[in-house]
Structure formats: structure tokens, C-alpha cells
Amino acid sequence: MVKMALLGCGLIGQFYTRALMGNRRRDSICIAYSRTQARADALAAQWNIPRTTTSMIEAIHDSEAELVVVAVPNHMHEEAVLAAAAASKGILCTKPLGRNSAEAWRMLQAVEKAGVFHGYLEDLVYPPKTLKALETVQAGALGKILWVRSRETHPGPHSAWFWERELAGGGAIVDMGCHCIEIARNFISKRVRPVEVVCWGATQVHPIDSEDHAVGLVRYENGALGQFEVSWSFRGGMDLRDEISGTEGTIWLNHWLRTGIEVFTAAGSSKYVSEKSESSTGWLFPVGDEASALGYTEMFDDMLTAYETGSTPRETFYDGYVVNAIVDAAYRSIPSKRWEPVQLQQWRGDDQTSADASQELIDKKEEIIKKEVLPDGTTRWIVRNRETGEIKNVAARSD
Ligand SMILES: NC(=O)c1ccc[n+]([C@@H]2O[C@H](COP(=O)([O-])OP(=O)(O)OC[C@H]3O[C@@H](n4cnc5c(N)ncnc54)[C@H](O)[C@@H]3O)[C@@H](O)[C@H]2O)c1
């Protein structure tokens, strides 16, 4: 049973608390910090949290708390992490780790120097569907992963600070691209180095300095591509989808707007439907267990088991740092309109991926481009002669 100090009682603090303390779970939050006493007290009353405070330092130093859960706005992550590391507490920090990679690097250094447990709370690599898809990919069912497309779009965040570039560190890219980037890294393999990024981003709708819409490509050293699509201008709720494409297969994941329960109501619902839902009449798409569908439940299982057993969780501060470095490259690419290198102070994965040796050979002279069974039932191979470069159809060639 692990006792934790929760910093921040906003939207994510509430989701985290439900994931940690709902369903008769054994771990608990022993102190909650919020800017306003009333908000901390409301959360405490709902979940029987024994202590509340409006002092972040008091929460971090709470004698019962072994771990500190950082769930405050982006501009406060570094201050919170540095104070928790100085107090020798283990730390779980929400996404993005920093507003930029310089902040994230300082946080990584602080936890490693202090020798404290650290986990990066990237929930969207933990939904049960995603864990199943990762297991499938890791078992080789999709062959070599070539392209991972990940999308998070909704009508925009719920709190003022997100919309201020200085406080958030950017707009939709740092807020949601961080999820998409880490999802792609998990499927492509975190051992493979992200090399460069090209990104389009614009402020299409809102009166703000940050981008409210962006699309980016991340090129990995083994040739794989990560694609992120993020928007704060999307209408119709929250669209969370991933597509994984490999030499041997494909996986499509839809996490939110179509999850298997579709409700039509002419009378309407006055209650909360699901995160970022835009309507309460007509067709509605509720979610059975939001904490699990968004990965929070399995994420805390992994984090707290790793803490108790002295092992490393799936997501660490180093992962958060790499994500921030990719986000930084995306922000450089928007004005330059070029591929920008991912600048890492230190790379901890593989140095060089071996040249792709997966190309199947028919014989020494010919290599296969494609094999297809045609409507008449015959099999056609399309092959390329390695010496002459000639490409031709070969009918009914046997395997
Ligand atoms: N899926 C996810 O992992 C996910 C989802 C939402 C938010 N987040 C992250 O969680 C963090 C908090 O986001 P949120 O949506 O809970 O925010 P929120 O605005 O709903 O809540 C913010 C909390 O921080 C406190 N706070 C302290 N100082 C503050 C200040 N100067 N300005 C505003 N609030 C202040 C507030 O009192 C409140 O308790 C952010 O880093 C955000 O990126 C993660």
C-alpha cells in the first residue's frame, strides 16, 4: 500500500484520484494540494483524503507521503519535481514532462542525482486495447513497423492556463502531440532513435498565440515514421485514434467516439457524458470506464508495482525528455518549414539500426516487390531484377 501526496486537484488530479482510490483499491492519497482550499477540500471529502493544503511544499514534505504525484499546470512541473527530488520523494509526473526539453532535462537530472523513483504519467500507452496492440506488435504479428499515425483532437482544453503559450509551453502540440509521439515510440520501439521532425502548425480559430491545429511527421533511424495529428479546433467531442502499419499487418484503435456504446436521446441528458463531449442530446457516445479507457488504471498499476518491486516502469522521465525534444523540433520546424533534427543531450537507445534485412528474396537475381492473388485465383508476383533493375510480373509462381 503506497501513500501519496497529490499536487493539483483539477481535471487530471480528479481522474488520478479515481484511478488510485476507486474500486476498493489499496493505495491512497494522504494529502492533496490545490491553489484554493475549497477545491482541495471538495476532492478530500469525495475520497476521504485525510489532509489538504494550499502549500505545495507542505504537501511534498508530508511525512506519510512516499510518492509525489505532479498534476499541476505545465509551468509548475519543474518547481514541483525539483522540490520533491530535494525531499528524496519518489515522483510521478503528468505529461508533458516539461514545457520544453531544457526543463525536462533538468528534471531528469534532478531525479537521477537524488536517486529517487520516477515515472512519466503517459496514460495513453496504457489503455487495455493499446497494451494488447503492443503485445501483438512485440510478438511480431505486424512484421516491421513502418508507420504509426496517432490523432488526438477535441474542441480545446478546459482551463485558462492551457491557452497561454508561456504557461503551457505551446499549444496543441505540447499538450496533445506529446501523447501521439509517445504512442508511436512505443509501437516503433523506444530503442530506435527519433532523428528529425517536419511539422505544419497554425492558429486557425482561436484568439491565442499558440497553435490550435498541427500535423507532424517524426522520422526514426530505422526508416519508420510517426505521424501526429492534433487539434483544439475539432468539433464533435474527443477523437482519439491510432493506426499501426507494418510489413505484415495493420492495427486500428479507436479509443473514444466509438467505443461500443452509442446512445440516442431526444430528451437529452443533463449529466456529464464523457470527457470533451460536446452534446447532451441526439447521438451520444459515453464511455463505460473512462479511467481504464484512458489508461489511468493500468498506468498506476505499472507505476506502483515498479515502485514497490524496485523495477523500472514502462514510462520514465527519460521518455518524457525524449518526447519534449521531439516536440521542440516540431516547434522549430513550423517557422523554418524544414525537417529539423531532434536534439538530445544523451541517447540511451540503440546506436545504429542495422539496414533492413527483411526483404524476401526469390533467388539471388530477383527480389519480390509484391505478391497478390488475382480475381481469377492465380497468384501474381511482381519482381525486380537486382542486376538490371527490370521490374516484371511473374504469373502463378509457386511459393
Ligand atoms: N491525459 C493526461 O495525462 C492529462 C489530461 C489533462 C491534463 N494533464 C496534465 O495535468 C496537468 C494539470 O492539468 P489539469 O487539466 O488538471 O488542469 P486544471 O486547470 O484542471 O487544474 C490545475 C490544478 O493546479 C492548481 N494550480 C496551482 N497553481 C496554479 C496556477 N498558477 N494556475 C492554474 N492552476 C494552478 C489548481 O488549483 C488545480 O488544482 C497539466 O500538466 C496537464 O498537461 C494530463
Image (spheres, rainbow, N blue to C red):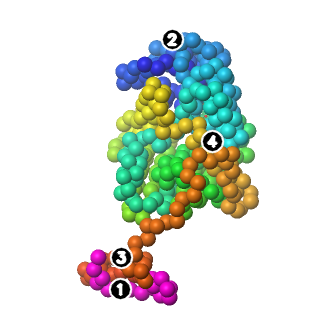
- Tell me the mark number nearer the camera, choosing from 1 and 2: 1
- Rounded to the nearest angstrom, the CA distance separating label 4 from label 3 is 42 Å
The amino acid sitting under disc 4 is: Tyr
Where does label 3 land, which residue? 371
Q: Which mark is residue 394?
A: 1
> Residue 151: percent from the left, percent from the top?
52, 51
Q: Is residue 393 magenta?
A: yes
Regarding residue 206, the answer to whether it shows in the image is: no
Taking the spot 43% from the left edge, 19% from the top edge, the residue there is 1
- Rounded to the nearest angstrom, the CA distance separating label 3 from label 2 is 65 Å
Specify few, some or many for label 4: CA neighbours under 10 Å numbering under 14, 14-19, or 20 or more: many
Magenta span of residues: 384-399
Specify few, some or many for label 1: CA neighbours under 10 Å numbering under 14, 14-19, or 20 or more: few
- Tell me the mark number nearer the camera, choosing from 2 and 4: 4
Where does label 2 land, which residue? 50
Taking the spot 54% from the left edge, 22% from the top edge, the residue there is 67
